[in-house]
Image: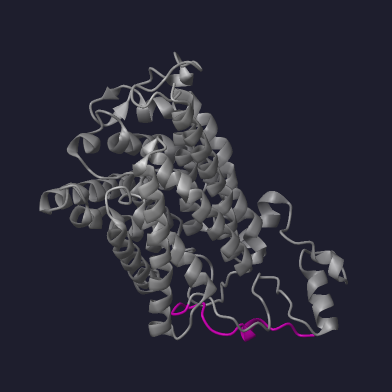
Amino acid sequence: MNGADTAFVLLSAFLVMLMTPGLAFFYGGMVRVKSALNMLMMSFVSLGVLSILWVLYGYSLAFGPDAGGVIGNLDFAGFKGISDGTLTEKGGIPVFAFALFQMMFAILTPALMSGALADRVKFSAWTVFIALWATLVYFPVAHWVWADGGWLFDLGIIDFAGGTAVHINAGIGALAAVLVVGKRAGFKKDPMRPHSLPLVVLGAALLWFGWFGFNAGSELAADGTSALMAMNTQLATGAAVLGWLAYERIRHGAFTTLGAASGAIAGLVAITPSGANVNAMGALAIGLVAGLVCSWAVSLKFKLGFDDSLDVVGVHLVGGVIGTLMVGFLATGGDAGLAQFGKQATGAFSVMGYSFVVSWIIAKLIHVTIGMRASDEDETNGLDRAYHAETAYDFSAVGGSSSGPFTGTLAGAAAAGTTATSSDGASSGASSPARPGTAESGPLSEKKVDA
């Protein structure tokens, strides 16, 4: 056993685990206050569901002995035949360390889709959806890309840490689910601004930190490649932040905090498949392009009419495609060229096609059986009360009646002459914009409280 590499992989697994609560904060701050806890829970529940599925059959389907290039068999179901002394064939690390690391990928990937469905999905239906989606979409695609015998692995696609299996997979799956579930009530009409930008930045920072484990840890060894991947992760992310902010400033006239956080995620997504195969200048180019293009792409939902609530498609799908395709021309070591680009395109679009079709079928089956969409009343009043019997903030302490989750704040704010939060979750009297160029931009004066 290689003790140093084992410690590195375990530490990387812990960092990737942190990304899921980081994602919960990132998404949770972006929604209106009435459904903030529901947004946190949509990520957090994945930690429970996918951990169980992974040991029962997920690890075996993804990394078990190959069956036809498309799926693993069930030889390792329940971790059968694996002990604390069982080592990987390459690298000499315990299989349990590798399985734990890959478990965290399986947990994070379906959680990424939750942002597209914010504010309008039944929590029970969401839990069933991610269980089925992981089984029918994530586990097979992970085998295609990373397992010996997987058809994309054998094709020679470059996907070091998950541009196809994670980000393209989740991004296109989210789009399919959105098309089944439909738009939020008030989409393109009502203000739907982030209720807490500090939470968004906190979540983005936790994701950025954890992403070093996500990317560098995929080398499964503490060596020069993992160091290169870590460095390129930082470079691409920084370039993407600046690219997104530059686009915002030119197009909309402001450098927004939400834009900086979103730009960071776009850069992290784009460098994920490519960072171990490009030099520093290539990483900067990938990050800059991702920041610029993803900033533009998030506005497409308004033109095309699909309600991707928190821009999962614009950031994860588009960013994943950018990183997956650009490495075809920027790869070092003689791998770059039209032949490699063709392999990259084959991987990207085959995953898109499979994931979209199967994700749509899963969402449709749930929608016509137990129901995927929350009721109109629950959507209007907020999913926190409806599904979790809680609210994100205890407003009753402010003063006034505590009969509802927001009444005390309205009364207290009116008495104090301060900014309040209305019952639909939109801030009143504030003036900071949401993402520029969307229907949500502009002052918040529409929702002023009548003192």
Q: Image point 79% across, 75% down: which residue?
A: 410
Camera-side residue: 296 or 113?
A: 296
Q: Quadrant of the N terminus?
A: top left
Which quadrant would residue 308 be assigned to in this image? bottom left
Q: Which residue occupies the extreme top position in the image?
A: 81
**Image position of 221 (left or right of 426):** left
Q: Where is residue 212 in the image (x, y as percent from the top left)?
A: 46, 49
Does 439 lie within the magenta span?
yes
Q: Where is residue 324 in the image (x, y as percent from the top left)?
A: 27, 53
Q: Provide the residue span drawn in magenta.
A: 436-451
**Image position of 295 (left or right of 335):** right
Q: Where is residue 144 in the image (x, y as percent from the top left)?
A: 28, 36
Camera-side residue: 369 or 27?
A: 27
Which quadrant would residue 448 be assigned to in this image? bottom right
Does 93 lie within the magenta span?
no
Q: Quadrant of the C terminus?
A: bottom right
Q: Image point 56% across, 54% down: which residue?
A: 206
* Residue 246 visible in the shown view: yes
Relative vertical location of residue 98 with respect to residue 387 in this rendering, above or below = above
Q: Which residue occupies the extreme right position in the image?
A: 400
* Residue 306 visible in the shown view: no
Q: How many labels does the image show?
A: 0
Q: Image point 34% across, 43% down: which residue?
A: 225
Q: Is the magenta stretch mostly helix, strand or loop?
A: loop
Q: Where is residue 437 in the image (x, y as percent from the top left)?
A: 43, 80
Q: How is the structure coloured here?
A: one colour
**Image position of 22 (left or right of 338):** right
